[in-house]
Amino acid sequence: MGRSVCIIGTCGYPSYYGGFETLVRQLAPYLVDHGWRVVVYGRPADVDQHDPERDPRVEAVMTRGLDRKSFSTITYGFTSAVHASVRVRPDVALVMNVANGFWLPMLRSCGIPTIVNVDGVEWEREKWGTVARSVFRAGASATARHATELVYDSTALAQRWSAMSGRDGTYIPYGGVFRTKGPAPSWRRRRTGAPPRPTGRRGTRGPPQPFRPRLVVT
């Protein structure tokens, strides 16, 4: 029987909310092709289970949480971590967003190693209020303390986290799918009516790289 991974902390599969979701749409089928059982946790309101581009081999599990700006990530992360710990018991958990660092001890207590994708320094972003910033900072501290492995999407971020927490990690740049001709993907036409732009996420990390996962879990 192949290995298994639970992906926690995104809006789900398939979802088109942001960079994490773009990663999952590429990574989940890739892992299935290479013999993994892939379980992706999500939020019912953000996932289109009837998407024609959905890979049916990827298991999409919807959990409950609070659909509020400051609490959605940690509440959905909590219910996802509980389900993964009790019902799935995967070989590894890929956790997106350091706010979910609170739930890493739960996964570790069940013998589940964790890879956490560190994406920015959320507690310094102006869009968050005082409470949300405190939650992100505390979650980041828990991530630094309890994560088995950290993944950074920029070298500058890796250096910043190393200075703050003393934790090194693996640098994997954001990727993208290059298209030179043909119609835009159906999800892009459906949402914007425009072809996708070949730029890096938020335009801050350079041009997209071909999708090529480099972190190997043994």
Image: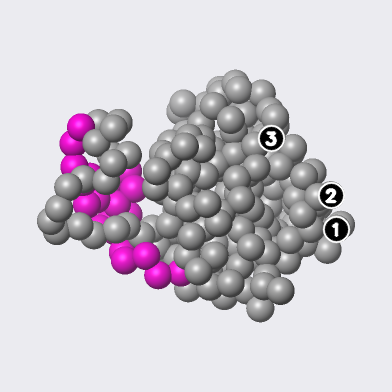
Residue found 59% across the figure and 33% down from its top? 43
Q: In what element is the residue under mark 3?
A: loop
Magenta-colored segment: predominant secondary structure:
loop
The residue that disc 2 covers is 86
* Residue at left offset 39%, top offset 47%: 53
- Distance from disc 2 to disc 1, alpha carbons, whole Å, reads 8 Å
Residue drawn at point x = 53 percent, y = 73 percent = 34
Which callout, 2 or 1, points to the residue nearer the camera?
2
Label 2 neighbour load within 10 Å: few <14, some 14-19, many 20+: few
Question: Where does label 1 land, which residue?
Answer: 110
Amino acid on which disc 3 is placed:
Thr
Q: In this view, does 206 lie above or below 170?
A: above
Marks 2,1: beta carbons within 8 A: yes
The part of the image, by quadrant, that contains residue 187 is top left
Along the polypeptide, which appears first: circle 2 or circle 1? Answer: 2
Q: Which amino acid does label 2 sit on?
A: Val
Instruction: Estimate the x, y position of residue 168 in percent, counting from the top left.
Output: 59, 67
Is 9 left, or right, of 104 in this rendering? left
N-terminal label among 3 and 1:
3
Q: Is mark 1 on a helix, strand or loop?
A: loop
Which amino acid does the dot numbered 1 rest on? Cys
Mark 3 vs mark 1: give the one in front: 3
Q: Which of 194 and 140 is in front in this view?
A: 194
Alpha-carbon distance for marks 3 and 2?
13 Å
Distance of mark 3 from mark 1, alpha carbons? 19 Å
Tell me: residue 167, above or below residue 21. Answer: below
Q: What residue range appears in magenta?
A: 193-213
Q: Earlier in the sequence, mark 3 or mark 2?
A: 3
Q: Can residue 139 be seen in this view?
A: no
